[in-house]
Amino acid sequence: MSDTQLPQGDPKGQDSGVHPAHSGPTGAPTPMADRPDTASTDDQSSAHQVAEAAAQSSTEPKPVENEYDGADRETQPAPSHDVPESFNVTVIVRRYDPEVDDEPRWVDYDVQMYPTERILDALHRIKWEQDPSLAFRRSCAHGICGSDAMRINGKNRLACKALVKDFDISKPIYVEAIKGLPLEKDLIVNMEPFFDSYREIQPFLQAASKPEKERHQTIAQRERFDDTTKCILCAACTTSCPVFWTDGQYFGPAAIVNAHRFIFDSRDEASQVRLDILNDKEGVWRCRTTFNCTDACPRGIQVTKAIAEVKQALISGVKL
Amino acid sequence: MAETSSVTDGIHYHQHDVLIIGGGGAGMRAAIEAAPKASTAVITKLYPTRSHTGAAQGGMAAALANVEEDSNEWHTYDTVKGGDYLTDQDSAEILTREAIDAVYDLENMGLPFNRTPDGKIDQRRFGGHTRDHGKAPVRRACYAADRTGHMILQTLYQNCVKHGVEFFNEFYALDLIMTETPEGKRVAGVVAYELATGEIHVFQGKAVVFATGGFGKIYKTTSNAHTLTGDGVGIIWRKGLPLEDMEFYQFHPTGLAGLGILLTEGARGEGAILRNASGERFMERYAPTIKDLAPRDIVARSMVQEVLDGRGAGPNKDYVYLDCTHLGAEVLETKLPDITEFARTYLGVDPVVERVPVYPTAHYAMGGIPTNNDAEVLADNETVIPGLYAAGECACVSVHGANRLGTNSLLDINVFGKRAGNNAVAYAKTADFVDLPADAADGVVKMLAQLREGTGTESVAEIRKALQETMDRNAQVFRTEETLQTALADIAKLRSRYPNVRIHDRGRRFNTDLLEAVELGFLLDLAEVVVVSAINRKESRGAHMRDDYPTRDDVNFMQHTMAYRTAAETGASQGIRLDWKPVRVTHYQPTERKY
């Protein structure tokens, strides 16, 4: 964040005339092929992935069916030792207020940004300096609370983890609500169906015994489900899933990730119950392995791998 | 179990035995106790899993002695000394004694703690936690990588799902209803604003638990979430109830420079070192025995001193370095993965090979709503308000005194959240509902209408920014009479502008413009209490460092500040009356604090 007083940009017309492929106010699906391209951005970084980063060209659109390879933004060599220059960025936001609008509209805003700032900073600048009516959720602003998942240039990210410098700012940046959940206002969707699916997989430890102290667990047993404990329930994965877009009844990746977290926990005794739930016609078998979820996860969870492990457990039992 | 709801004149009415305000760690821990025994509603501004408990990283203290010798008594001593002898010692004894079961409770609920080679909960070092009364750092912090708070929040939410706790998500509590009865003032309920619809809900309850978190957003550089605006503490304040020790605000030493994003003290617990521009391990000069693992107030002050003395790093010499490079990639990736990622993402610095620029960041309110050891809210130094409870950061028991030790807050929310839940449900079992006044919702309806329909020209964002900047400049790690008076004058000006704020969003649904305006009102109220309390404490103790009174003065100031809002508002200033409350001492007489 910067102390510098920034020049105020004027909000432009009500409608920029730019309409990337999208659909109506219910947040119904956008076909993958029609998404505003992901080519203008690099992938979001995660600790593990940066360490093993094998640079992938940022200009090459990723084939959807490819396995996510963990390629990420390169680690920058130096901290912010030099005072960076600010530049103008056009951010085009899909606005919708059901009290006023018949359907969503794209509104563009010019904002002065520094390269190390986040898309969340751009949204705040719009809200605090240009149009206070813009509505979005946010809280922690550093990728741990999961409030600000949104679709940025056609890809689900947390606005607080999407850095401006990772975008091609010669083009506008498109920001819209995540898809597949009912749109409430601007960038806010109704999260209840998402949490309903989560609650349905019985996301709590089930064990009959009540030990005097802690239950024991080896380091390896604890490691077995470590990845899926990172989930912050932001819904970036579930709302990037083409199956979920077309079938809102599908449990979706996040619910399966949270089932995985308990199925592979050596302390839990209800794995079979959860596996039975996920063996349902709206369960894991609906996954088409497009890897969108893994790609979207801001926590770097190997979501598709977790789903595959649940499928495997249904076939050959849980291997702890 | 009582549980009803209805709508009259556009206002929704609900009835529950226990009302819990806030869905973070303390609120959900309370709910897990209360919900199985009585009708319980959690009213929360955020989805519970968005709460800032989830941002806590390093650990939760408990003398389990899983990896080396430890005792509750050592933990109590450290907590009292860490709090610079303003800690109420009987409260600290409860905290450290019940810590053990609090950790086992969480493990039994499913929390995936890191493990020792023999399968027990692993423990790491943390600032100010020592063996045998300060002899050396001790491994006391139970942890789950560097996302312990995340795992606590998830585990508590999971268990709320298990117990079928009823949540009112994105309901913003704005008023506490108290009714005068022949037995004195009694809690009757809570008024909340539903963010999705803009509708008003009145919740009648026998017992009310405040678990609303802190108010770090009075500062600009802070580890706190945007939503931490002190609403709950502000509601209590506006009811004329006292606030305790508000001048004690903790600055966490290691915020990412310029951003304030938290890097856990657990990094230093794992061996990371603070260095100045020339690479010197400067904490050896300030705390020769435990060095980088001194308590936060001392480390934060030392860092600022290095910068003031010209030994800061960077183009403006305005930060120091956290050096993790000798820890190795494996320790960073397995025990500190999140902070490693934060440094990479937000500063473009890789802690595996580079030093990370850090500077103190506003982090935690030691002060807040005064309670006794049963989490009952106090109307003065002794009088309990029947049926009203508070726990977690919004409360002041006081277990943290003048400076909280790292890992004692995740402990606090579990120990006192549980106590609040248990005591609230026990009270609700014996008490009757108190009648709601007919105009219960009027205050909130009027306040919102005034804001929403105002025709002023002031910007909420500008006033908030000016508030945060003056607090950063004038009421931060080092304070003087002059800087504090400057802050007070600035706040008075901002308060006079506040009634003229303009809300641009005139709609009902998800009106976050209106929400931010209401939040700003609480921030302004609380910032003034912080500054007025700080002016009044003419000594230096714990996190409250007065350059003009640089030593601790136990003769005059070893007592808690109690601030009351009086009816006498003068211009832009609230009427504030200050009083004192004795510190409860059991075993530890104050001595000079050296580490």
Image (tube, rainbow, N blue to C red):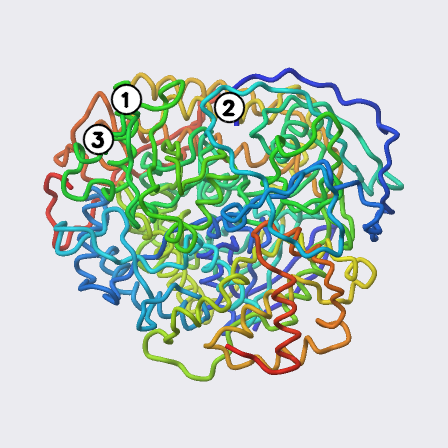
- Asked if the residue under mark 3 is in contact with the one under mark 2, i.e. CB atoms within 8 Å, the reply is no
SS for dot 1? loop
Rendered position, A297 above or below B574:
below
Give the labeled residue for mark 3.
B540
What number is the disc on residue B311? Answer: 1
User: In front: B507, or B577?
Assistant: B507
The C terminus of chain B is located in which quarter? Answer: top left
In the rendered image, residue A226, in percent from the top left (x then y), is placed at 49, 63
Query: Quadrant location of residue B174?
Result: top right
What number is the disc on residue B532? Answer: none
In the rendered image, residue A38, in percent from the top left (x then y), is placed at 74, 42
User: In front: B424, or A251?
Assistant: A251
* Marks 2 and 3, the one that precedes in the sequence: 2
* Marks 2 and 1, the one that precedes in the sequence: 1
Judge depth for marks 2 and 1 and give the one in front.
Answer: 1
User: In front: B352, or A261?
Assistant: B352
B76 vs B215, left or right, is left
